[in-house]
Image: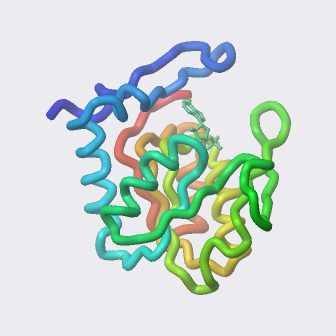
Amino acid sequence: MKDLKSYIRTIPDFPSDGIQFRDVTTLFGNPAALKHTIDLLFGHFRNDRVQMVAGVEARGFILGGALACRLGAGFVPIRKKGKLPHQTVEESYSLEYGEATLEMHLDAFGAGDRVLLIDDLIATGGTADAAVNLIDHLGGDVVGAGFVVDLPDLGGSARLKSRCDKVVSLVTFDGE
Ligand code: AMP
């Protein structure tokens, strides 16, 4: 099996000039690479008694759903505003340009439940920070956060570590 990093495609200047988009659909499309990714995340969190995996729309759904099955946990979607049908909690956060809002169902899990946050990539950490706020709002215990890709120069993973004891990423890209 090749290095996981080699399965991630980089698209320059997407969605805007200067952004190096780290495209994990090429990793998802390779059966061995996808299985290896889930195996590695499972290995990191298998002993953390995870009850719920919270995945961030949309690539976090793919990883989080597969990982939840392996961990014997439930799955909670964290979605962009306006998509969830029942009562929600919401959290707005800043993007490079403008604002975005994430939502989670108000009854997604109970207070004290052990929740693992999953997304494909952490950059500035704004998305992860908003997701942790949502989990906190419901009284969940964030036992960890897992990502395929970390862009450490953007500082998100370092920031998240001050809120969550266990932050795991499988691949690192230096620079932006
Ligand atoms: P951030 O909130 O800055 O940590 O950005 C993380 C979210 O934006 C994740 O859901 C990623 O899927 C997406 N994202 C941010 N930067 C990139 C990038 N360079 N390549 C691919 N996805 C990205």
The image shows residue 31, relative to residue 158, as above or below, that is above
Q: For residue 124, what is the image quadrant?
A: top right
Task: Report the side of 29 relative to 130 (left or right).
Answer: left
> Is residue 27 among what the camera can see?
yes
Percent position (x, y) of residue 49?
38, 79
Apparent side of residue 14 relative to residue 26 in the rendered image (left or right): right
Q: Residue at x 54, y 44 (%)?
A: 122
The residue under the point 45% across, 20% down is 10
The residue shown at (68%, 17%) is 16
Residue 38 pos. (x, y %): 31, 51
Point out the quarter of the image occupied by ligand 1: top right
Answer above or below: position of 96 versus 130. Answer: above
Q: Residue furthest left?
A: 1
Please tell me in which quadrant of the rendered image residue 19 appears.
top right
x%, y% of residue 173? 43, 32
| Image quarter hosting the C terminus | top right
Residue 84 position, x and y percent, is: 72, 55
Q: Quadrant of the N terminus?
A: top left
Q: Can see residue 165?
A: no
* Between 163 and 47, the one nearer to me in the picture: 47
111, 127: nearer the viewer:
111
Question: In the displayed image of the protein, which residue is found farthest to the right?
Answer: 98
